[in-house]
Amino acid sequence: MNPRNSIRGRLFLQLVGVAALLSLAFFLVVRGVAERAAEGTQDDILLASATAIADSLRSEDGQVTLDLPYSALSMLGTISDDRVFYRVVSAGDTLTGYADLPLADPAPTLGNPAFSTLVYRGDEVRAAAVVRAVGPATDSQAVIVSVAQTRLGLAAISRRITTTATGVGIGFFLLATLLSLWASHLALRPIVRMTNSVARRGPQDLRAVPSDPPEELAPLVEALNSFMARLSASLSRTEDFIAEAAHRVRTPLATVRAQAELTHRKLTKPEHKQAVREMIRAIDESSRSAGQMLDHAMVTFRADALAQDELDLAALMNEVCDRLAPTADLKDITIKRALPDAPVAFKGDGILLQAALQNILDNAIKYSSEDSTITASVTVASDLHLSFSDQGRGLDGIDISELTTRFNRGSNADDVVGSGLGLTIADEVARAHGGQLKIVPNDKGVGACVSLTLPR
Amino acid sequence: MRLAHFTTLIAGLFVAGFASAFEVEDRRLFEASPQRSVLKVISTADLDVFTPIIRAFQADNPGIAVDYTVTGTTDLMGAIHDEGAQFDLAISSAMDLQTKLVNDGFAQPYTAPANVLPDWAIWRDHLFAFTQEPAVLVVSDRFFAPGEAPRNRDELITLLRENPDRFRGRIGTYDVRTSGFGYLVATQDSRNSEAFWRLMEVMGRLDAKLYCCSGDMIRDVASGELGLAYNVLGSYAASQLQSTKGFRIVPLSDFVNVMLRTSLIPANAENVEDARTMVDFLSGLNRRADLVTASGLPGIDSTALQENPSLRPIRFGPGLLVFLDQLKRQNFLRSWESSLVQE
Ligand SMILES: Nc1ncnc2c1ncn2[C@@H]1O[C@H](COP(=O)(O)OP(=O)(O)OP(=O)(O)O)[C@@H](O)[C@H]1O
Ligand SMILES: [Mg+2]
């Protein structure tokens, strides 16, 4: 499946893309917030420490001194095992602590502590500095207390946070991916449902799609429905046209033929009688042609969307034989039926199969001499075999492969009325059903054997 | 002389550069044959205490010669902090000074094998404790019948207050101005209990004698010269008990400061690999009963501490830097002197 060519694929990729973006944003926000919180914690403790030291400053005999509180430094050990430095500066002189510890820049002012990040003894340190006025109000001294701490603990915390945030981000992404998969599947379910309901339909089922479509699919369904309505209308128009055409051509021809017969009876001169007989024959040919052409059109049309009726081929065969029995009687031809007792089930278009069989039997009758026998048989083997063998004139000297071509008649058929479409129709019906039309000489030496072979 | 030396050093640590060769008290080379490498150790533990440990170390790790230098706690600090002396391992009983060495960047990290030492015995992967040594009260058999000795500081204060004549001039304790260990336990005492200053007051009124070392105090207590000595190094007293009669060790029930002897690998160490081997070896001291007996140094033992809640190991951390602060130290010594040295 090419994801670019699939709505589900595209929807999924887009959802995953959004999830990836959200995961990344989530990761950055969590890490940012947590790191700032960790940094803030260190700043708070540094400030508390510096304030505790500043609180212990006092003036003794005009000299600034302090009693370093134990907690001022020990509290710095509570969050991490970082190194700790401090410095107390009074009037430019280092009172106590690390004399080389750089003072915060910008310098703190009274009431405004200063925080800075500096490099001291090869390590990055965070420093908080406060200023206190010490001594009598008239002669007070500004004392700067600066407390610094390395940031290894902070780095460890930040590593831990990054790991956690990464883990959560990836987990979130994976979960979102799964949900996207599910969501894209769900979103397309109505389409799948509709597709199935349309795909399950028979070829003649051109009703509107009944399911209540999601809003977005409504235009598509509407278009589909209106298309089907038009198609259905056009199909019924075609069927109507065929029936109409058959009626329109046959009816006047029948009238003309009846008139010609009448005229023939009234005429006395042999040459006139001969002329009208030829006219009648031409009318018969035209009538036959019209009928066969309409049948052929019908076959072509029905073969496009083959019906799948449950059929019993033995019954069908019987019906065809019954139908043509009167024609056969005219020539004293016996139709022997070699049919199985049990029904022979087949799925296909009954009307087409009937037309095909009728044409084959019609040929057998037409091309047989009087008083002969035609055998209709149905055999069930790996294929279904429906055949008519006759004892007629046979196929000697005829190119059998040409007989199924439209309007092609054999050289043995000059004296018989016909259009050359009968075997064409039978062949097309056979192929529409995935079968074959076979024309072979009768194996009993005389006549022909024409059969339909259909797959089981 | 020594007092001036110590004070100057501490001042020097913070304000000005201090340059004077440290005083080597003792030095011995423990050879190895064939010799693969030399491990240079600077330590505050006496040779006779550490010899069995070094021998056992060499038996486990053949080929390592140990060059063992003994010096005082402040000298060790000065040697590494100010003089840049080159050693592969520094072993000291002064936790505060060792902490300062680490804090000021004079040690290098080593990730010791997990689960050998408890967390509280390691600081920043730089400082490794290997003994836990309590500061104890030592009493003379001549002064106290069995079971009569005071059991806590309040009882001790009451006893001294009620019998001034019996104990005048008969009490001993560390001179915290000269002894690093004495200063450490005294400052921890002052943090732990208000009774400390009352005790110092009483002891000062009774003309307490001031000592440099636990050995001298134990000797005088055993002989009956002193009735009792306060804050004696318990591990040393315990090992003396085997050879010296006439004194007893009294673990006070209110609290007992427990000092941790520590090792660190200086930043400029050359033989880092062997130094790490030694750190690991020392960490396992408690599992070598023979060495504990031979050296008199009790190894790290969490269960012992859990069983006796009055034992309080001194905690590692930047808090230990507080009493090293120049002004803080001046203040503390001033208070101490005004209580104890009442001329
Ligand atoms: N049973 C048969 N015996 C001998 N020849 C046959 C037989 N069936 C068909 N043919 C030959 O095949 C030719 C084609 O048959 P087809 O049925 O297509 O046309 P048709 O019978 O001539 O005309 P129509 O369209 O009226 O049936 C026939 O003209 C005839 O020559
Ligand atoms: Mg025909």
Image (cartoon, coloured by chain):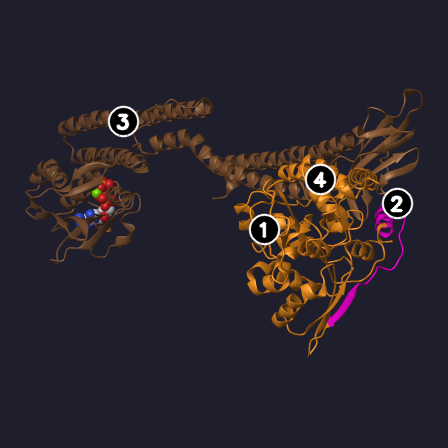
Chain colours: A brown, B orange
Question: Which disc is residue A243 wearing?
Answer: 3
Q: Label 3: few (<14), some or many (≥20) within 10 Å? A: some
User: Is disc 3 placed on a helix, strand or loop?
Assistant: helix
Look at 66% across and 54% down and name the residue there: B128
| Residue B118 marker | 1
Are the residues under marks 2 and 3 on the same chain?
Answer: no
Q: Which residues are magenta?
A: B4-29
**What chain does badge 3 belong to?**
A
Label 4 sits on residue: B164
Mark 1: secondary structure: loop
Q: Mark 4 against mark 2, which lies toward the viewer?
A: 4
- Subunit that carries the residue with mark 1: B
Place of residue A258 in the rendered image (x, y in percent of width and height, measured from the top left): 18, 26
Q: In the rendered structure, does residue B142 fall within the stretch colored magenta?
A: no
Q: Nearer the viewer, mark 1 or mark 3?
A: 1
Front residue of this view, candidates B255 and A123: B255
